[in-house]
Every structure is written in C-alpha cells, then in structure tokens.
Amino acid sequence: MALTAIIDLSTRAIHYVDTDPVLRKRFLGGRGLGAKILFDRVGTETGPLDPGNCLIFTTGPFSATPWPTASRYHVTFKSPATSAYGYANAGGYLGPELARAGFDALVITGQSPTPVYLLVTDRTVSIQPADDLWGQMTTTAQDRLLGVEGKTGRNGRVLCIGPAGEKRVRIAAITTTMVARRHAGDLARSWDRNDSKPFTFAHPGTRLLRRNLPPSPGAPPST
C-alpha cells in the first residue's frame, strides 16, 4: 500500500501512514485527495503564511503507469492570494517518481529556522541542509544537487524555487527538471512565506524535492 508522509519542519518529525483506501476512492485523484487533506488539517484560523498551513503534493491512481496524462501531480495549499483553497498542477517526471517511491502524498507543515530541502527515496523522506542553495537560481540549485546538466552521473529529479520565490514575488514560479514550470505565483509565495527565516517552502524551510533514483526505462531525455 502506498504511503502518506507528514513532514513537520518545525520539529523535524516525519511520520508515515498508509493512505486510507476509502479516501483514495471517495476523493479520486490527486486533486481530490489533496483537497480533503487540506480541509482536514488546515482550519479557518490558520493563515496562509502560518506554520500550520500545509503544502500537499499528491499523485493519482494512474501515476507511474503508461496511461495518458498519468504524469500529472497536484500541489494543494491555503492560498496567500485569497486565504482560501489554492492548488497547482504540473506534469513531467516528478509525479511518476513520487509514485514509484511509494507515496500517494507528501504533507509538509511547520517552519524550519535554517534552509533545508527534502530528499525522497524509496518509501523514505529525509530533511537535508540547504544553506548553499539559498539565493541561487533554479538551474544552479539543480546542478548542485544532481550534477551539471548533460554530464554523466546526473541522477534524480528536483523541484525548486529561485530568488523570486524566496522574496515572495507574486508572479514567481516553481521549476521542476529544468523546463517545467508551475503557473501559480502564490504557490511560490507559499513555498517561501516567512521573510524572518532564511528559507521556506510552503512552510519555512523546504526548498527542494528530489528522488535519488535513475530515470525510468524509456523515459525521454531531459533537456
């Protein structure tokens, strides 16, 4: 059974639970599951930039299969723009890799006092220091984590913000695997939402999401 990982950046605690199959069936797909988790975990009293807000990455039932459009994944949060339900959706490698790692959902909350990123491997999430990545452009951050684009040994996928997201610019985007970008500007503001801390990702602290595994067989080359 696939897992839901709950990551608290304030306490550095990471809990894994089996995703409820009833929820997966009733709230079908990444968008439905993310909305349900947000509804259950974030109340009306929680502000979009509060540590209690959640950034929720979800996959769908067809993720990591050859089904058309199965590469999509969903990100759900309480929007800084509206103080209500917010979400973004993207394709590319990250959704299938997250599903292959054994996760239906990553639920990130809390606030880290120092820059960090999340390392996602098979059924495991760890919090890693990211001081050297703060202030870097997204291409530089990805190269530092994976190696220079085009060279042998580059291994994994990265989702990250750049200086605009760190400064909570309204039109900032989140970049994944060099070329795919999310359109939701307030998602990047949710990623970096507390300027009293050096680094934040929906809740302070999270900067990058990576799975340290080789590309899937038959996957198109990165550009």
Image (cartoon, helix red, strand yellow):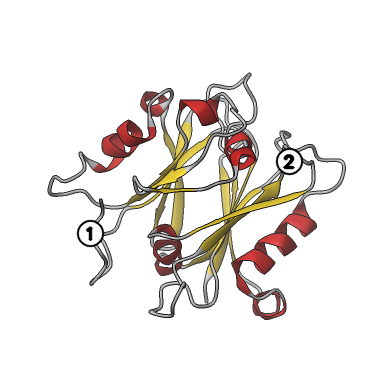
Task: Residue under label 2, please give it.
Answer: 52
User: Is residue 51 rendered to the left or right of residue 116?
Assistant: right
Q: Where in the figure is residue 164, as x and y percent of width and height?
A: 51, 27
Q: Dot 2, how many residues are within 10 Å of its Cα: few (below 14), some (14-19), or many (20+)?
A: many
* Callouts 2 and 1 close, C-beta under 8 Å: no
Residue drawn 79% across the image and 47% down it:
84
Q: Of helix, strand and loop, which one carries label 1? A: loop
Which numbered marker is on residue 26?
none
Closest to the observer: 98 or 113?
Answer: 98
Q: Amino acid at mark 1?
A: Pro
Locate residue 132: give its quadrant.
Answer: top left
The answer for how far apart the CA atoms under marks 2 and 1 are is: 38 Å
Q: Is residue 118 visible?
A: no
Q: Residue furthest left?
A: 152
Q: Is residue 108 left or right of residue 71?
A: right
Q: Is residue 1 visible?
A: yes
Q: Nearer the viewer, residue 45 or 218?
A: 218
Q: Residue at x 55, y 46 (%)?
A: 183
Q: Nearer the viewer, residue 47 or 189?
A: 189
Residue drawn at x 43%, y 43% is 175
Are there few (<14), some (14-19), or many (20+) residues within 10 Å of tag 1? Answer: few
Q: Amino acid at mark 2?
A: Gly
- Rendered location of residue 223, percent (x, y): 25, 51
Residue 58, horizontal then vertical, whole percent: 57, 62
Q: Secondary structure at mark 2?
A: loop
Compared with residue 87, is residue 170 higher up or lower down, i.e. above or below?
above
44 left or right of 178 in image: right
Answer with left or right where residue 105 lies relative to residue 115.
Answer: right
Q: Nearer the viewer, mark 2 or mark 1?
A: 1
**Rendering coords of residue 185 (x, y %):** 60, 39
- The first of marks 2 and 1 along the sequence is 2
- Residue 221 badge: 1
